[in-house]
């Protein structure tokens, strides 16, 4: 495969530790204006406007649960300690649209190593920021099990591709994209990449997640990108790329979103057809 090459990002491609992608980087205006952030709105085109009233103040992230070094981190302290790097990743939404995005952030494994999980820790549970006053759709959608929660197995969380992102297109992470810190797991459907994280907890049992709890028949815990397993209401065999076209180009979806070589070993012996 070829490195994605658009604008200044092409000059950095060879420095990336992650696998290259064979498509151009999505134009920034599309990646920052077509967003799922249900706490603000169910309308993707409306989210960018809705977040304008949200003031992202000093940010703390609590690391707790089954670990030897629990701590609540000030975000600037954490990013200074972890350092940041650039990663270009495919991004595949469960709704069958996709982008290629240049993130800035650090491997989640670095924070995990710092927290020193206990032997009984098998999963990582993450929780999003919640503020009913700033996020109007929380009150309008009381059937959702707020706050937004997500989870990974500890092995998935430790994988070198799993990123805590603090930036996008060389800039601080926009509010609509999950400011100031979010998860990015490129081989899974986008809803797994939880936004605006305030808490990370190590657990011994599989954590409940918002979408799996709300609609378990449609959104599984693993949610690995798999073109052979359709959503109950639409096919996952192909995806439309976000490029501003009235009729976006459709391309075949790749197993594990193109990262099969890197992550398939995480699921050895398990039935991939159940991973939706």
Image (spheres, grey):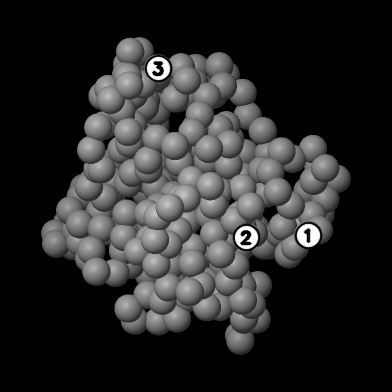
Residue 133 in picture, x, y percent from top left? 22, 47
Question: Does any portion of residue 192 appear in the rendered image?
Answer: yes
Question: Does any portion of residue 136 appear in the rendered image?
Answer: no
> In the image, what residue occupies the spot 55% across and 32% down?
107
In the displayed structure, 122 sits above or below 263; it is above
Question: Is residue 140 shown left or right of residue 41?
Answer: left
Q: Quadrant of the N terminus?
A: bottom right
Calculate the distance from the C-alpha at mark 1 to the C-alpha at mark 3.
36 Å
> In the image, what residue occupies the spot 33% across and 13% down?
68
| Tags 2 and 1 touching, CB below 8 Å | yes
Quarter of the figure with residue 182 = top left
Q: Earlier in the sequence, mark 1 or mark 3?
A: 1
Residue count near mark 3 (Cα–Cα under 10 Å), binned few <14, some 14–19, many ≥20: some
| Tags 3 and 2 touching, CB below 8 Å | no
Quarter of the figure with residue 197 = top left
In the drawing, what numbered circle is on residue 1?
1
What number of labels is visible?
3
In the displayed structure, 93 sits above or below 251; it is above
Residue 226 in picture, x, y percent from top left? 49, 67
> In the image, what residue occupies the spot 48% across and 74% down?
228
Residue 50 in picture, x, y percent from top left? 38, 58
Q: Earlier in the sequence, mark 3 or mark 2?
A: 3
Frontmost residue, 223 versus 174: 223
Calculate the distance from the C-alpha at mark 3 to the C-alpha at mark 2.
31 Å
Residue 86 in picture, x, y percent from top left? 68, 39
For label 3, the residue is 116
In the drawing, what numbered circle is on residue 258?
2
SS state under label 1: loop
Q: Earlier in the sequence, mark 2 or mark 1?
A: 1
Residue count near mark 1 (Cα–Cα under 10 Å), binned few <14, some 14–19, many ≥20: few
Give the residue furthest to the top: 69
């Amino acid at each position: 495969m070829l490195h994605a090459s658009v604008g200044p990002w092409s000059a950095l491609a060879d420095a990336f530790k992650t696998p290259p992608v064979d498509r151009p980087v999505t134009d920034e205006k599309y990646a920052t204006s077509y967003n799922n952030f249900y706490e603000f709105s169910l309308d993707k085109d409306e989210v960018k406007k809705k977040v304008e009233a949200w003031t992202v103040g000093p940010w703390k992230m609590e690391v707790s649960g089954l670990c030897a070094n629990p701590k609540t981190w000030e975000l600037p302290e954490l990013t200074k300690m972890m350092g940041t790097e650039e990663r270009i990743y495919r991004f595949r939404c469960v709704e069958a649209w996709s982008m290629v995005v240049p993130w800035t952030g650090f491997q989640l494994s670095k924070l995990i190593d710092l927290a020193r999980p206990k032997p009984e820790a098998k999963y990582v549970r993450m929780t999003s920021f919640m503020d009913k006053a700033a996020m109007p759709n929380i009150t309008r959608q009381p059937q959702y099990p707020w706050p937004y929660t997500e989870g990974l197995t500890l092995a998935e969380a430790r994988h070198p591709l799993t990123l805590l992102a603090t930036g996008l297109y060389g800039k601080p992470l926009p509010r609509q994209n999950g400011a100031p810190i979010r998860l990015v797991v490129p081989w899974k459907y986008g809803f797994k990449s939880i936004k605006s994280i305030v808490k990370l907890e190590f657990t011994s049992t599989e954590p409940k997640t918002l979408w799996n709890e709300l609609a378990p028949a449609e959104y599984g815990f693993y949610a690995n990108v798999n073109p052979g397993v359709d959503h109950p209401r639409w096919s996952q065999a192909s995806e439309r790329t976000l490029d501003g076209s009235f009729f976006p180009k459709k391309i075949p979806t790749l197993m594990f979103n193109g990262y099969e070589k890197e992550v398939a070993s995480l699921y050895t012996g398990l039935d991939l057809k159940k991973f939706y």
